[in-house]
Structure formats: C-alpha cells, structure tokens
DNA sequence: ACCACTACCTGAAGGC
DNA sequence: TGCCTTCAGGTAGTGG
C-alpha cells in the first residue's frame, strides 16, 4: 500500500498546478474534521495551535501562486503550502474506528481528516516543504508570496517583461530563470527544457540575448509548462479516486537528466552535457544551444 | 544590487 | 553483504 504512491517528484509549476487541482476536487467544500501533527515543524514551525485553527473549517478554494498552494478556509484564513522537494499528499480512506495515524509512515507529518471519509496525508521526507496560516486578506502580502515574480501564464509575462528583467543581469540565463522573484514557478527541470527548446545555452549571459531569442524563449516556456500541465491533467482524468496511485507526470524529458545521450533534435548531432551552475545541474546541448 | 556558494534534509545509487 | 560517499534540489542566509 505505502509503495503505491509516488515518492520522488520535484514539484515545479505544472506539478503544483496538478496537485492543487487534485486537492481541490477532494477538499472543496469538505469540512476538515481534525488536523493531526506528527511533528511540530517542517521547514518552518507548524505549531499545534495552527492545526487547531484549521480544524473545523471548510476549504473553499485552492489556488496556485508560483510553487505555492493557497487554500482559503471558511474561517477567513488561508493555508499556505509549499511542497519543497519531496512534499506529496496522498488520500486514504478514513475509518472512524481506528487511529487516524494508522496508515502513517515515518515521514508522514500532517494528517487532514475530512468529513467525507477520506483523509489527506502530507508526506515530506526531506522536509523542505512548509505550511503557514494567515488571514486571507494578508495572504498576498505574506513575505513568501509577495516576493514572487510574474506568473508565466499571466499577461504580464511577455518578451518585453523578460527582456527588461534580463537587461541588467550579468549572470547566466539559467540562474535567472530559477529566480522566483523574476518568474514564479520555474524549477530546474523546466528551466533546462525551456532553454533547450529555445536553442539558448544555459551559460549565456542574460544581457547578451537578442530580443528575438527572448521572444522565442517566452514561447518555449509557455509550451513546456502547458504540455507538462496537460500531462498531469491527463493523469488526473484517469483517476477514479484521488489516491495518487497512478504514475505521476511521466514526462519524457528531452534534456533533463539525459547527459551522455544524443541531442533529441533531429537536425543536431550533438549530445547532452551536464554542467553545474550556482550549485545546480544544468543539462544542455553544446551544439544547438548557443 | 547582483551573484555564487552553502546549509538544510533524507533516500537512492554507486564504489570499494 | 555492507559501509561509505555523493547527489538530488527550493529556499534562505551569507559573503564577496
């Protein structure tokens, strides 16, 4: 049972979007009967008093902002959730006769017991995830949220915006794409994939990219994210129950973690190379990414 | 202001 | 078989 749900995933925008939709399906308009904490902190403190403020409320909506999920509660407060590296929710049937933590493993930190016979268990082995509870009116000004840059699918994210953001930066484009203050939601995987599609080297200095290539990059970021969300969405449609048992996000990455393999571009004879930038792996083709 | 590096954390994978 | 090292990565903090 425990091995039936995905453990390893790296939640970037498409994954968080998919999980938010999935959570919304199960949580929406359900009363949260109780919240059980199995430890008092994730990346940040998760005090018992916060669990008690969540319990007894309905979740009205769950929206995504960058890699964060914002669940608005009927109490007028909003639960901010970040999945970090390894955060995942799974749903198990709730049995009122037994201890709600019966199904929990060693890294299952938070259990949301719902009115509708399900419980949502938050698991996060590496504990890079976090949750915080704030008045809904203050959610957008929460320090974690307020510092986020534009949403990739908002009208504000276009070539003019990106060109303006890159103009004053000397560092490599790859690091800029990971900067959540510029664009909210891109992570290492989709940054690599977007740059490959756009034919731009991850090492290229931000202020040395011609405008027409920035136009292309914006298009590629849109396409990569849209396809990834569609892949997650199709997984969602296959689910009869939101138990997470089916494979998640089975993407075929073109470059991410493909070092040593031939460049997938039919016109290119290069191979995928791995380099380290700002302490993070980048995968790219030296021949067709310039 | 910008940029790079490191700590945080644990499981998986590879080396010997 | 088993121990050890390395690596993965989002974010915050530090120091150049």
Image: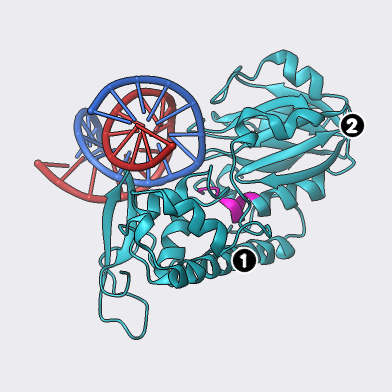
Chain colours: A cyan, B red, C blue
Q: Residue A74 carries which label?
A: 2
**A38 versus A206 height, above or below:** above
Where's the C terminus of chain A, which quadrant? bottom left
The boundaries of the magenta stretch are A10-16
Q: Name the residue under label 1.
A: A226
Q: Position of residue A84 (x, y in %)?
A: 53, 38
**Residue at x-position 52% and y-position 44%:** A180
Query: Tag 2, which chain?
Result: A
**Residue at x-position 25% and y-position 66%:** A260
**A76 versus A261 height, above or below:** above
In front of the other: A274 or A286: A286
Q: Is residue A281 magenta?
A: no
Q: Position of residue A130 (x, y in %)?
A: 60, 30
Q: Please give left or right for residue A75 compared with residue A121 in the image.
A: right
Q: Please give left or right for residue A161 compared with residue A126 in the image.
A: right
**Res. A80 visible in picture:** yes
Secondary structure at badge 1 equals: helix
């Amino acid at each position: 049972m425990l091995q039936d749900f995905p453990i390893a995933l790296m939640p970037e925008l498409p994954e968080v979007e998919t999980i938010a939709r999935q959570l919304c399906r199960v949580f929406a308009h359900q009363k949260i009967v109780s919240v059980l904490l199995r430890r008092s902190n994730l990346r940040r403190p998760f005090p018992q008093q916060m669990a008690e403020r969540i319990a007894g409320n309905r979740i009205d909506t769950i929206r995504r902002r960058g890699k964060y999920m914002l669940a608005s509660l009927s109490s007028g407060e909003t639960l901010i959730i970040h999945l970090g590296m390894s955060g995942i929710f799974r749903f198990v049937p709730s049995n009122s006769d037994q201890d709600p933590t019966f199904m929990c493993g060693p890294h299952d930190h938070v259990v949301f017991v719902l009115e509708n016979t399900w419980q949502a268990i938050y698991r996060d082995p590496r504990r890079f995830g976090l949750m915080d509870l704030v008045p809904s009116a203050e959610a957008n000004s929460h320090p974690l949220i307020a510092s986020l840059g534009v949403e990739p699918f908002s009208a504000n994210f276009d070539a003019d915006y990106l060109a303006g953001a890159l103009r004053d930066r000397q560092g490599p484009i790859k690091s800029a794409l990971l900067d959540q203050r510029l664009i909210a939601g891109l992570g290492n995987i989709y940054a690599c994939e977007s740059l490959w599609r756009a034919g731009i080297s991850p090492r290229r200095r931000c202020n040395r990219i011609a405008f027409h290539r920035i136009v292309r990059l914006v298009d590629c970021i849109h396409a990569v994210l849209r396809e990834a969300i569609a892949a997650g969405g199709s997984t969602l449609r296959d689910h009869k129950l939101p138990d997470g048992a089916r494979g998640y996000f089975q993407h075929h990455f073109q470059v991410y973690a493909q070092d040593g393999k031939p460049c997938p571009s039919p016109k290119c004879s290069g191979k995928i190379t791995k380099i380290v930038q700002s302490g993070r792996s980048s995968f790219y083709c030296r021949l067709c990414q310039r």
